[in-house]
Structure formats: structure tokens, C-alpha cells
């Protein structure tokens, strides 16, 4: 059914296996199979398709050229030296052929000039052991304050978890760790069981014997040494105890039954089967006048490609780039927590969906395939596609002799990524009126912090628990192509005016008008939503005016009341690793060298990220250019 | 099923009839039956229930007192004098009993001190005749420019419609009128068939022989007299012609059939029947832990009363106050158009709903009853109530050994008001998480203006048609009572900070915190939504802290991305008649003398409205007082 091959689709199991074998054959890389590796071995972190360059892809999609050669993007971690690092490689063309297939560093898509980033927590097992040793040394105190221990023993009631990202200060690397109460039931509820007790470790270098504890925190108090901490604990006037697991952490239904909830609620049925087409081989989808390809990328999950309306391309690419959760707290661990979730694999976290709950029971499900620890994993039923009646008309009008009404049927493709405590529901929906929406919802457990008595960082929501204020900022790339690649960014603004009109008898009239202007340079293209929604933005094609003289295009606007950029300014926790989070909308000139606003492993070295989004802005023209939002 | 009588419910047919008869018996009022009336007769404009005072109502609802005496609110228009006016009356107690039932002016709920407003268009028939005479006098020109006439003859292709509200300037009253192309098909499409040809009439006084045309406008040109206009027409270089009706104005399906649209789309069914209770006698509704009464008011439609959660009142009153559509244009008629739709009767415009389109086919329908022209009218199936599955979970979490997911079933009560060209869909929805949302959607025909070649007031959307920029501002009253009447207004604000912490080694950390404060006075209670959504507002009860020390309450936030206040500042078109439109949110101390932010007939005399919302603000305390939003 697909008109062409899906050139965006991830590697096949066969390709994964071939590339893995090929890489292991390269003596220079000195790779060890992941299953046999120690923290001093070089390993394959991941493989994925290197997405084709747009120019090559368009030539193929428009029948002007061959399918672009397929390349794997290989993320390798080099642990065999004192300073471990990740380096990206490209391997291809695929399939692997002797003499033809090569590997080389993948550098051209990174603003730093290299697809490389230093890694400072390569020795994860040693770090965990170090922390448990600390837990053992102060087990008298954890028993006293928290009624438990974290020593590595089977009867530990506590566990230790560290901050993400690490803190870089000068040439030192630090991590704050917190004791958490371990869950006791069947629910992994640790993120709402903080204890407040935290210690800071200087993790610099790869010799664990040189690591040391350089600070303690508990319930608002700070001590620079373990000795001071031991002494200080004796003088504490407040000993609130830990957050303790219990039925309150259950995600199952609790409490009084709701009236009439024993009856089955309304449910959507699909009386004549699906009204959309799916080419499962090519991951190609058609609904009404829309068609598109999908891919699933390990780090960023579901992506949409070559979205067409009545056969005409309107979007080249639409997909998640990164999801940030930035916390603030009076305690050091949560104050330095700023998760860049693509590093955890938003794609590989797309698990099976719950039929009838995550998606309507008449949904069509697709599998996704990812490469994890050198093996191909299939996640069954991890995407769903369905039409749905929103339950209100998209149009209706009544007169004394006629009524017209149109159902608002929406087509949706949805995935849910469970990244630790959080479940992100991502969906793209297509509407009869031509609009396309992306929606993100979050569920699961919050990451609470310990309640220390003031409300500067959240509400007091359980015995010793703070709701823990945080910002979610989710970044999507949208590459619209309106009647060709060359487009412009139209700004329309409602402005109050006072004006004398020819007909107003010389009287000034207080009214409003719409100002139209074009944002013509990247110097002006970092946009925050205007107050009261008075400014609207549209990507239009000025060279293809319609018969009324208006430029055709797509209007971009926030679909919900909670679309926000990051509150924190120049975040200490983030460094330069997520500069896309500072505004609501950006427009840039497309370059094959700038395919992604984020890099999943930026957080390893947040002051020296491989992709610094700010560096995309260099004053280039946005006047009838290939604009990317 | 209702625990008490619905004391908010409108008058019964019997009460309407009784009060009508009673009023006609009052010689002093000198009323004429509407059917027999001329423009010089006093008439009953409308009757409705005078809503009880909150103090009396609460006494009854809480079992501390009797049901408040029922009073009718009678809106009478006195046309028998040179300056016609509307005066509001209260008639009661009901039922009408000789010697007991009285009528008196209803003044205490109006900021002007009187429930009275001057009326300047009482002579509607004479105005229409005057305008047709103008149309006849220039029929040579309308034929030339517009290919039609508006003379009152059967073969008129044009009609004439005037601005709302009238323009008041000094002691003169003006109206701009525009020739419209009359619809030719079955669709009342006039509002997208403007011709641009407009004339201004000085309507001052009640003697039509003294009315006169004092200005002409066409396609950007203005002439102060008809003579000048006649002359000017000859020199026009642009004669764009009218907007002509055709298939493009149809609201029925047109164009190519969509692929697979011959199949029936998904549809919601209710396998075990409704899971809510409706007391049709008392208009009382129960869903899950929520219960409430409804009323339907002639001017403002559906209103909710005494909303309880688990039996505890959380909202005393929730309902629409007014809907404003404010236009701007280079032409005088649309520049002075600012519709206050309650004057057209948003309640009486609640017509029958289209089953399966306006509401799911398993919805429960209710009738509404209104008093129109001294008769009781039943609008069948004009409210619908239904549960609906939003199609995404309200909660879900997945772990390696457990998944929990909860359907997001929402209970909705909906009405659709067709006010001329516009269909407003109003709904209140209740959610499992305790949240309550009000949503307004608009459909129908836009009111376009004539396209005169520049885009300062809209986009060019058809041959001679401008999309006509306008603001919709819709005002609701929400009277929350959180654990009693005395509440406070909490503001929580996310602010970026740079701070040195005890644990930060003297380093300043760029992070954020939440500022909590209370808005304690009406002086500070005109609120616009903060940029980036950083400020949140909640009505809370500071005197009933929960076990964690937090004040219980309801958070108020915009549910969509398009919740706006009026762009225009100090609107010339509106005068003082809709000052509630200038901000997003207001908090006020409740007074029985301030039950409504708007008055349906304010637009008759917009510089001297009976209710001027600004006058509600007099610096009163909002610190543990009965707060109304
Ligand atoms: Cu969150
Ligand atoms: Cu509108």
C-alpha cells in the first residue's frame, strides 16, 4: 500500500545483527560483548538507523532519485581509558558488504563538531558499592533516624539513589545521593519514599579509593564532613522519621466505591471496522486525506515522516526531541535533578498498551522493535491507532428550517513510555479540519521530596512528603513544507489601537487591528507565547499565494492551557544541555547538519554538550527558506 | 430523589400565567398585551424567576429555614412616553394571592441604583421603514454597485441590517446600516454576504420625520451627505460588486468524498444504561460523588446550583453571565459591532439538540421552558446529560510486575444556543479527580465584513469577504464555598531565583521556587493570566487546614489555550457595558446586591449601564470572606 519504501524505518533484526558483528570485527575499536563486559571494556551502547539527509530523502520520495543508502548510527562507549567517553559512529552502507561497508566517526550533526561526550559514571558498580559502604558506616545513624539500613544486606529497608545529572564543578565531579525507603508492597513506590538523608560524593577519577564523602544533608541541615554529621545528628531537635510505604502508595483502586460504578461505563465501538489503512511492512498509515510514515527511535520513540494531505507533502518530519523534568528543592539532590529522559530511552520504554484503557478496545496495535544490549527486542502492541468520536460536533448550525452537524472524528496514533516513575502518553491526532495536534500527558508516581516544614518548593502532601515543584518541558521538532521547502514565518498580532477613521467625524475610536509581519531572521526566532494569546504564528509560503492573495500555511498554537517553557533561567542543574527549553517556539533554517535539537547523552557533560541548541542560531534568513520549528 | 426542592428553578407555566395576569391588572403600569401592542404601548418584555438571595437559600438548603419566597422578575418596557425605558420589577410572593402579592421596582441588584435603562430603538418598525425608504431613494446606485435593491419590494435582492449597539454621541443616537445580499438558497447566510455599502442614520427622538441620513460609506470611502455620495459614486475606480450567495455558503457536506467515509465511524454506547441520576421534577442531578441542581434562565441559559461533592457543598453557583463578540473593521458598521448576546436570550436560544451529533446517542435529554411573548414555550431535548469515555486513561502506571490504568470517564451537561449566525456549545463537565470544567465552543456562520483590499482587520477568505477579526469573551460566575462561605484567594507563583544554599559550598544556584501569597483585597483582584502560566490561583479555606497544614481549595486555571480577555482597551463600541471583559479573572466579596456581573439590556445605553462591573470593586477584604469569581 505504501507508495514508496519507508526509508525512515529503524534497522531490521538482520541489520542489527550484521552491524553488531561488523563492529566487533573492527580490531581498532576493541569492543567487548556487553554480556561479558566490565566497566573497563569498550561496548556498543546502542544502534539505530542514521536518519537519511532530507535532500536525499526528498529526491527519493519525489521519484527523482534512488532510496538513500542506509547507515547505522552506532553509539560506542570507550571505557578502556582513564577518561571514558561516548563516540557516535556511522556504519554503512547496509547491508554489510566486505570492502564496501565502512565505519567512521559521526560528527557532522553535532554542534560541538564531534559526536563525542565524556562519561563520568562509567564505573556504576563501583559507585553503588561505594555508596553501600557509606550506608554501612553510618548504619547506626540510619537506624536512629530512619529505622533502617542500606548496607547491601538482604534485610535492608533502605536503598540509595543518586542525582541525575552529576554536578560538575571545576574539574571535580560530584553526586548527591539520598536514602530512600524501599517499597514493601508490590508497587515500586520509592520516588514517594524519600528520607531527606543525603550525602555528596566526590566521584572524580576512576580510582574508587580516591572517592570521598564531602557533605551531608538532613532535614534542612548541612555538614561538610561525616564527623560533623555524626556530631550534628545528636543535636537534632526534629526527627521526623522516613516516609514509610503502605497502602497509600498503591495505584490500585482504594476507598469507598463510587455510586453506580458497578455499572459498565460508556464504551466506544467501531461498527464497520477501521476506516484507516496500515501497511505494517512499511509502517505507512492513511486516514482520510492524510498519509504518513512512522519510525520508532530508541531515544525519542515514535516519529512521523512525510505527512501528506491529499497527496501533497505538508510536513517532512514531526517528532519528539527530548523531555525534560526539572526539579527545585531546598534539598541538594532534588535541587540538582533535571532529567533528560531520552537518555533513558523514550523509545525503548514504549511498552505494551492496555487495551480498552490506554487505547479504545477497537484500536489497531503495532509492535515496535529496538536494539537493547546487542539483541533485537520486540515490544508487542506498543503503538495504537484508532479513530475516535470526541463526543462533540466539529461543526453545527441550526436555522428555523435546517440543521447541519458534523461529528468530530479524530484519528490518533499513541504510545506510552514508562520512564521509571513516570508514564508519558504521547499522541498525534489528525482532524477533519486539517489540523494536527500533539498531546503529552503524564501519569505514574511523582518524584516527591522530603517535607522539611516550609512550602517554598511544593505542597505538603503526605506525612513527610512534599509535592516537589518541577517543570516539564517537552520539545518537538516540526518540519513543515508548505507547497515546497521554501517557507516564511508569519506573525499576526491583535493590537489595541486608537484611530480616527474617515467615517468617525474626527472622533478617535478605541478598537483593535491585526498587525501582520514576517520573522525574517533567526535573530528574532526565539519565541515565547504572547500574553492573552494575541500573537499567532504560521509557517506559510509567500510565493504560492491563493486566489485571494493570502499565503497558504499552517498556524502553530498551544493546544492546552499548560504549554510552558522552563521557569528556571540559566539553570545550574542543566548547564548548556537543554537550551531548547528556554522558549516556547523556535524557527530555524533547515540544515542536514542540525537534524536534532538535543542529544540523548548531553547530560553526561552538561557544560560541554555535543548538541548545544543555542548554537543553531546564527542569524540565518527565514524568508522563503526551509523552516524548521 | 432531590434532597430538597429546587429553589432556583424558573417559573412554572402556571406562575408565568398568574404573574402575567396580575401585571395586566395593575392600572398604573398601563400594559398592553404584546400581541396587540404598538411601539407606543407599555409591554412585558420578559418574566423569569428572581433568584433567591444566597443567605435565604443557604438557610433552606442547610435545613435551617423555610424555602425562600418565590418572586418573579418582570422586565417591563415603557414605550408610552417620549423617552422609552425598561424597568425591572419584582412580583411576589408567588403564587399570586390577593392582598399578599405585590409588585415593586427591582433596583437593589443594579450598580446604577435602579433596574432601569433607557431604550433608543423602541420604534423598530419605523426604523425599518426609514431604512427601506433610504434604500428606495438610492436604488439606482444599489443597482449599479450591487446589482440589486432594498426597497421593501418582493423582488429585493438586498436587505438592510443595522449595528448593535447603537452609537451614542453627546445627546445624539446613531446607527450604521449595511446593505446585505439576501440569501438565495435554504441557508441563512447573510452574515457572510456583506456589500460594504453603509449609511449612518441619526435616530434621535421618536419622530421619524426628524431622523436623517448623516453619512455614507462604501469600500473605504466616506461621504457626509447623500448628495456627496451620489457624486462620489461616479468617480469610484473600484467597483468590486457584492458578495453573492451560492453553494459556497452551504453548511452541508460538499466536495470530494473522503476515503473510507462511507463506513460508519466509531460510536459510543452505554452497555448498562446511565450511571447518573436525574430528578426531572426538581432538575436535580447526581453523578458519582457529585450532585447539583440546574436552572435555565432566559437571558443566560443553563446555570448550576449547590454543587456538592460527597454531600458537602463546594459551589453555590456556577453559570454564564454574558457572551461578548467584539468586532473591529475599517468599515463603520463592523467597527461599532459589539454583541452582548444575553440580550438576544442565550437561554431562549437553547433549541433541540441533534442526537448522536450534538450529544452521544445514549445521552439523556431534558426540556427547558421559557416565557416568550407572554406565553410559555417548551424547548424539547434542549439539554443533554451523558457520561463519556475521553479515550485516554486518567491514570496509568506500568512496572515489571503490575499495571494499573483507570478510564477517564467524564460526566457532561451540555446545551447549544443558536444566537443568529452563531451556535454556542456550552458544557459543564465533571471528572473523577474532582475537577470541574466549563467549555464553550462556537460554530455556525462567522459575521464577515467586506474585503476592501487591506488586511488590517482580517484575512481575505472569499471573493469580497474578510474573515473579520473579533474577540469572543465569555463571562462565568463561580461562587465556590470551600468548607463554608468564608474563603481566601491563594496565589502560587513559580519564580526563577539565584540562591546560595547551606549545601552549595557558597555557590549561587540558578533554580526556582514557589511564592505563596494571598490576594486580600478587591483592589488587587483583577487578574490577567501570567505569562508562561507561572501564577496559579486557588480559592481555599485558611481556617480549615488539612492534617498536613495545607488549606483545602479549588485551583482555577484555563482549560484551553484560547482563554482570552478583550484586546480592545476602553472600547468605544462597548462604553461601560461590559467591564468584566477586560481581565481573565476577578475575585469579589459576595453581596446579595451584586448577583450578576452583567445586565442583558446594558447595551441599550452603554455609557449608562444598569450594571457596571467596575463598580463592584471597592477595596473590600478577600481574607476569609465569601469569595465570588
Ligand atoms: Cu511531573
Ligand atoms: Cu467568532
Image (cartoon, coloured by chain):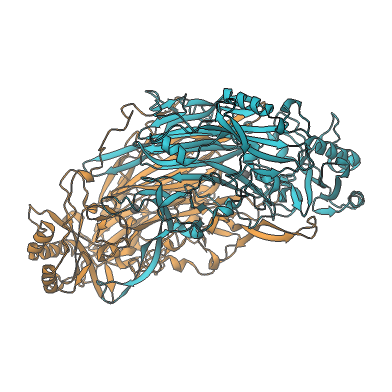
Chain colours: A orange, B cyan
Which one is in front, B518 or A87?
Answer: B518
Horizontal side, residue B557 vs residue A161: left or right: right
Which one is in front, B234 or A90?
Answer: B234
Q: Quadrant of residue A600?
A: bottom left
The residue located at (83%, 41%) in the rendering is: B146
Q: Position of residue B383 (x, y in %)?
A: 52, 29
Q: Position of residue A572 (x, y in %)?
A: 34, 69
Q: Is residue A99 visible?
A: no
Q: Position of residue B56 (x, y in %)?
A: 46, 38
Which one is in front, A306 or B577?
Answer: B577
Q: Is residue B5 visible?
A: yes
Q: Position of residue A326 (x, y in %)?
A: 34, 60
- Please count the marks in the image: 0
Horizontal side, residue A287 vs residue B74: left or right: left
Which one is in front, B438 or B220?
Answer: B438
Horizontal side, residue B554 vs residue B424: left or right: left
Horizontal side, residue B296 vs residue B573: left or right: left
The residue located at (43%, 37%) in the rendering is: B306
Q: Which quadrant does ligand 2 occupy?
A: top right
Amino acid at each position: 500500500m505504501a507508495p514508496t519504501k519507508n526509508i525512515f524505518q529503524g534497522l531490521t533484526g538482520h541489520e542489527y545483527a550484521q552491524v553488531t558483528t561488523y563492529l566487533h570485527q573492527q580490531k581498532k575499536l576493541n569492543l567487548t560483548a556487553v554480556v561479558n563486559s566490565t566497566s573497563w571494556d569498550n561496548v556498543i551502547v546502542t544502534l539505530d538507523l542514521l536518519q537519511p539527509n532530507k535532500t536525499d530523502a526528498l529526491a527519493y520520495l519525489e521519484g527523482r532519485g534512488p532510496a538513500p543508502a542506509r547507515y547505522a548510527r552506532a553509539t560506542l562507549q570507550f571505557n578502556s581509558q582513564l577518561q571514558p567517553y561516548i563516540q557516535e559512529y556511522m556504519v554503512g552502507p547496509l547491508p554489510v558488504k566486505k570492502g564496501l561497508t565502512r565505519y567512521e566517526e559521526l560528527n557532522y550533526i553535532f554542534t560541538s563538531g564531534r559526536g563525542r561526550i565524556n562519561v563520568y559514571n562509567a564505573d556504576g558498580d563501583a559507585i553503588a558499592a561505594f555508596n553501600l559502604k557509606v550506608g554501612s558506616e553510618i548504619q547506626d545513624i540510619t537506624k536512629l533516624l530512619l529505622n533502617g539500613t542500606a548496607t547491601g544486606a538482604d534485610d535492608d529497608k533502605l536503598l540509595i539513589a543518586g542525582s541525575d545529572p552529576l554536578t560538575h564543578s571545576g574539574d571535580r565531579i560530584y553526586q548527591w545521593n539520598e536514602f530512600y525507603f524501599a517499597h514493601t508492597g508490590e508497587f515500586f513506590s520509592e520516588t514517594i519514599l524519600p528520607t531527606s538523608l543525603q550525602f555528596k560524593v566526590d566521584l572524580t577519577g576512576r580510582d574508587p579509593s580516591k572517592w570521598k564523602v564531602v557533605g551531608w544533608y538532613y532535614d534542612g541541615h548541612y555538614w561538610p564532613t561525616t564527623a560533623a554529621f555524626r556530631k550534628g545528628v545528636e543535636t537534632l531537635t526534629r526527627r521526623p522519621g522516613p516516609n514509610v510505604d503502605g497502602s497509600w502508595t498503591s495505584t490500585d483502586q482504594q476507598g469507598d466505591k463510587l455510586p453506580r460504578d458497578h455499572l459498565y461505563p460508556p464504551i466506544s465501538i467501531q461498527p464497520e471496522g477501521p476506516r484507516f489503512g496500515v501497511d505494517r511492512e512499511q509502517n505507512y498509515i492513511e486516514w482520510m486525506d492524510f498519509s504518513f510514515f512512522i519510525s520508532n527511535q530508541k531515544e525519542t520513540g515514535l516519529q512521523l515522516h512525510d505527512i501528506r494531505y491529499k497527496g501533497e507533502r505538508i510536513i517532512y518530519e514531526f517528532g519528539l526531541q527530548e523531555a525534560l523534568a526539572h526539579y527545585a528543592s531546598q534539598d541538594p539532590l532534588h535541587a540538582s535533578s533535571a532529567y533528560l529522559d531520552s537518555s533513558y530511552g523514550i523509545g525503548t520504554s514504549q511498552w505494551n498498551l492496555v487495551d480498552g484503557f490506554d487505547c479504545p478496545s477497537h484500536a489497531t496495535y503495532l509492535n515496535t522493535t529496538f536494539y537493547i544490549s546487542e539483541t533485537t527486542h520486540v515490544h508487542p502492541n506498543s503503538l495504537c491507532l484508532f479513530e475516535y468520536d470526541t463526543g462533540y460536533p466539529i461543526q453545527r448550525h441550526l436555522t428555523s428550517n435546517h440543521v447541519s452537524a458534523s461529528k468530530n472524528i479524530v484519528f490518533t496514533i499513541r504510545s506510552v513510555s514508562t520512564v521509571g516513575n513516570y508514564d508519558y502518553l504521547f499522541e498525534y491526532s489528525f482532524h477533519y479540519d486539517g489540523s494536527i495536534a500533539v498531546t503529552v500527558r503524564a501519569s505514574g508516581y511523582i518524584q516527591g521530596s522530603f517535607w522539611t516544614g516550609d512550602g517554598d518548593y511544593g505542597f505538603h502532601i503526605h506525612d513527610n512528603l512534599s509535592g516537589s515543584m518541577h517543570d516539564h518541558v517537552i520539545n518537538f521538532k516540526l518540519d513543515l513544507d508548505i507547497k515546497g521547502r521554501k517557507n516564511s514565518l508569519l506573525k499576526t498580532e491583535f493590537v489595541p489601537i486608537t484611530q480616527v477613521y474617515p467615517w468617525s467625524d474626527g472622533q478617535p475610536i478605541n478598537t483593535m487591528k491585526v498587525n501582520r509581519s514576517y520573522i525574517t531572521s533567526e535573530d528574532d526566532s526565539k519565541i515565547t507565547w504572547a500574553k492573552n494569546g494575541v500573537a499567532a504564528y504560521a509557517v506559510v509560503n509567500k510565493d504560492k499565494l491563493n486566489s485571494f492573495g493570502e499565503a497558504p500555511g499552517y498556524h502553530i498554537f498551544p493546544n492546552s492551557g499548560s504549554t510552558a517553557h522552563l521557569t528556571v533561567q540559566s539553570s545550574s542543574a542543566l548547564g548548556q544541555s537543554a537550551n531548547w527549553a528556554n522558549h516556547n517556539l523556535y524557527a530555524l533554517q533547515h540544515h542536514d547538519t542540525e537534524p536534532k535539537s538535543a542529544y540523548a547523552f548531553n547530560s553526561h557533560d552538561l557544560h560541554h554538550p555535543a548538541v548545544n541548541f543555542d548554537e543553531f542560531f546564527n542569524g540565518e534568513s527565514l524568508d522563503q527558506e526551509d523552516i524548521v520549528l
